[in-house]
Amino acid sequence: MIGRSPRGGSAALWSGLTLCAFALTGLVASTPEQEPPRSSSTHTPVRTADQEPYCPPGSVPHAGTDLRVTDPGVPAAEGMEPTPEEAAEHDERLQGALLHLREEEIAPPWTIPVVFHVISARDGSGRVEDARIHEQVDVLNRAYRGDFAQGSEGTDTGFRFELDEITHTVNDTWFHHFGDHRDTIRPRLRQGGPETLNVYVAALGPGLLGFSTFPQNYAHNPEQDGVAISHEALPGGGLERFDEGHTGTHEIGHWLGLFHTFQNGCQSPGDYVDDTPYERESASGCPVGRNTCPQHPGLDPVTNFMNYSDDACMTHFTPGQAQRMAEHWVAFRDDPRV
C-alpha cells in the first residue's frame, strides 16, 4: 500500500471555504412532476476569513462526503471537505478492512459500470444529449488512463468506465432544487450495487460543480452512494473554466476514496498519499510555481485531478493515488459488508 503514514497530529487549514458536509441523492426517471418532501437540513452561514467553519446541528447528514466548487471562497450549501477527524476515521476503516484482505491481490484494471441520470426542466433547461454523456465517459477513461498527463507524470490507474444506461427525468422541482430534495430523489433512481457508479446531472446551485460520497459510506447508506455533477460542468456545458469534464474526474476520485490534495493543509498526514506534495489550501485558476507549504518538499499539486484548479490545468493522478483507489475498491466496493 502506498499511503502517507501519520507523522503527528492533523489540523485543517482553510481559505474561506464556507461549507459543511454534503451527501448525494439520486432521481427518478420519467416521473411526473411532483413536489417531494422538503429536506430538513439547514444551510451553512457565510463564513468570513477569520472565522472557523460553522456546521449547524443536523446539517451533516452523512459526514465525510466531498464536493467541488468554482472558487474556494464561494459559499455552497451544506458541504465541506472532511474534517481531520473524519478523514482519520475513514483511513482507519480502510486500514482495518485491508488487514482482512492481505491474501487478496490488489491488481487493476477494473471496469466500472456507469449509469447517468439526467434531470432537466420542462422548458428544456438542463437537457443533455446522450452524445455529451458519451463524451464525459470518454474523458473519464482518458483521465484514469493517464492520457492528459504531461511528460512522465502520467499514471494509468487501471480503472475504466463503461456506460450501462442513461435515464432522463423532466421535473422542474428536482432540476432547480436538487439539493433540497436529494434524500427523496436518490433512492428512486439508483441502480446496481457498490460496484456501479451512479451519476446524477442537474442544476446544483451557484458555484457548486459536483459532490460525491466515499466508499466507506456504502454499507450503511447504499441508496445515497454516487456522484452529482452540474449539467454545466459536463463537456461542452458552457461553464467557463469548468466545462471539459474534469468535475466528473474529480468527484469520481472521491467515490474511489481520494481526499482533496489540500486535505489537512500543511499538517501531517495531509491527504494520506505519500507522492502528492502538501498544500495549505485549494488552488484556483492555474497558478504556476505555487508553494503554500515551503516546509515540505515539492510545489503544490496544482495540476492534480483532486485539486480545485481549472479543468484545463488538471492533468493527472499519482501512483500513490492510484494505489489508494485500488485499496478502497477491494476494501469497500468488492465487499460492501466491510
Image (cartoon, rainbow, N blue to C red):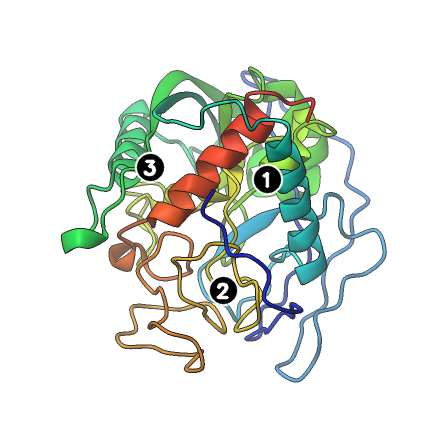
Q: Mark 3: give few (<14), some (14-19) or many (20+) Cα within 10 Å.
A: many
- The residue drawn where x is 53% and y is 23% is 103
Kind of residue sitting beneath label 2? Phe
What kind of residue is marked 3? Thr
Q: Is residue 150 left or right of residue 252?
A: left
Q: Which secondary structure lies at badge 1?
A: loop
Residue at mark 3: 157
Q: Which mark is residue 214?
A: 1
**From the image, which quarter does the C terminus lie in?**
top right
Q: Nearer the viewer, residue 242 or 152?
A: 152
Residue 236 location in percent, x, y?
27, 42
Q: Amino acid at mark 1?
A: Phe
Who is closer to the viewer here, 44 or 287?
287
Coordinates of residue 50 in the picture (x, y in percent): 66, 84
Task: Give the distance between the C-alpha atoms of the residues marked 1 and 2, in whole angstroms.
Answer: 17 Å
* Helix, strand or loop under label 2: loop
Compare marks 3 and 1 and give the one earlier in the sequence.
3
Front residue of 151/191: it is 151
